[in-house]
Amino acid sequence: MLVSLHFAALFGGLILSASVLAAEVDAATYHYPLTNPFEATILSTPPELRPELPLDDDIKQSDYSLNLLPHREFELPANFWAVKKLRYRMAKQDHPAPLIFLIAGTGSPYYSSVNEFLKKLYYKAGYNVVQLSSPTSYDFMTSASQVATPGVTRDDAEDLYRVMQAVHAQQLNVPVTEYYLTGYSLGALDAAFVANLDESRHSFNFKRVLLLNPPVSLVTSIANLDKLVQAKVKGIDNNTTFYELMLTKLTRYFQQKGYIDLNDALVYDFQNSHNRLSNEQMAMLIGTSFRFSAADIAFTSDLINHRGLITPPKFPINEGTDLTPFFERALECNFDCYMAGQVIPMWRAHTNGGSVLQLNNQASLYALKDYLKTSTKIAVMHNADDIILGPGDLGFLRNTFGNRLTVYPHGGHCGNINYRVNSDAMLEFFHG
């Protein structure tokens, strides 16, 4: 069972189901303060409830580049010069130590805020840390993806594994005692497939693997996020856009406050003011964030593969080309549109007519059920109110992982990862 270092606080909150033995953390003993899943997803953890971590200046770290540019049918446009090499960040200990790979979430680069938090957490605990971009980030798609059409998780895991092997080859001078792996959100789903791949490749023989808030079914999670953009928000009509409404609220808030102070405490103070966002507004804000990620993925994949869905294949693109009209067109394409217009046709072409049902299965934890059920080195931490989960998803996790699953009552989507209780439990898991 996964038990936090805050033993007395958390152990008393574990309710063990006789059938599945999942560690269900009781809401009465779990003191994460945000019980609204939308607020938790947006605001994360109040600064005073986070663990003490080292400053950047106290970490021996550098960014590195890998020359992995795949051999694809079309050459990259000139304006992609800056991302023809894949970059990653590594923090090194000054003595032999374990190494942990971090995989970022949807559309996120290696230096995402969650990856940065996890880097500091594990570095302080004595690990070498490698931060990797998501296969859905434009830099990874450009410089490391074989097909530049992320969405088939097995293929994305192959790309990630090749990157990890290249990192290992580049860092042979770093004395590593053993390897660990973790990821958050979509990066957690990727981590499960990477771990499964390593069982036959044996490049790392990961000792432990932790999945943080993974989608069980990528298709279900995509549908949930797309629905958030459709929320009906009071105050939005043909004359007032959602962004204008948000700007008005922020402007009014700063006028009342008397000054502008952009820091972690701002969002909590803002949500305690009269200008706070409603559930519908927060839902649309979250959905809009993921819509931008989808647009970035759709635009990049279409441009690299010359599909002509967003950018005309023969349109001359260079460093001075204004890409705004094409990105605006991409914003009209949500995740479902991207899957239907680019991923599914590619999947069918590569599998001689594979069905959509088969693709959906290959983009979910269901594809790895037997492996995950028996691999004792893999654990999951999730939230009961996570907005990316669908009906039956928690049941699948309970039945598959048993006591290797910890379910927190609150936290939304990844909002409580940097809560002290959660971070202590993560360290406890990797320490064994």
Image: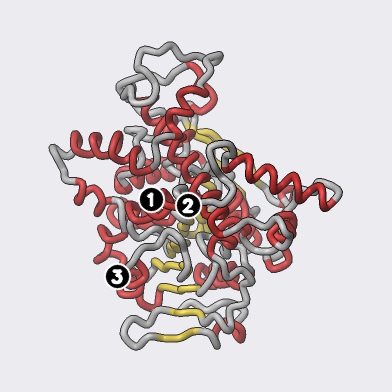
Mark 1 secondary-structure assignment: helix
Mark 3: give few (<14), some (14-19) or many (20+) Cα within 10 Å: some
Q: Earlier in the sequence, mark 1 or mark 2?
A: 1
Q: Which mark is residue 35?
A: none
Q: CA distance from mark 1 to mark 3?
A: 25 Å
Point 43% across, 62% down: residue: 209
Which residue reaches farthest front? 238
> Circle 3 is placed at which residue position?
373
In the image shown, does 335 or 211 lie closer to the viewer?
Answer: 335
Q: Earlier in the sequence, mark 1 or mark 3?
A: 1
Q: CA distance from mark 1 to mark 2?
A: 15 Å
Q: Does the CB distance between marks 1 and 2 fall below 8 Å? A: no
Q: CA distance from mark 2 to mark 3?
A: 37 Å
Q: Does the CB distance between marks 1 and 3 fall below 8 Å? A: no
Residue 94 location, x and y as percent? 65, 53
The label nearer to you, 2 versus 3, is 2
Q: Earlier in the sequence, mark 2 or mark 3?
A: 2
> Circle 1 is placed at which residue position?
222
Q: Amino acid at mark 2?
A: Ala
Mark 1: give few (<14), some (14-19) or many (20+) Cα within 10 Å: many
> Left or right: where does residue 199 sit relative to residue 286?
left
Residue 419 location, x and y as percent? 62, 67
Residue 14 location, x and y as percent? 49, 84
> Circle 2 is placed at which residue position?
231
Q: Is residue 269 visible?
A: yes
Mark 2: give few (<14), some (14-19) or many (20+) Cα within 10 Å: some
> Left or right: where does residue 177 sit relative to residue 72?
right
Q: Amino acid at mark 1?
A: Ile
Residue 303 location, x and y as percent? 39, 24
Point 50% across, 14% down: residue: 318
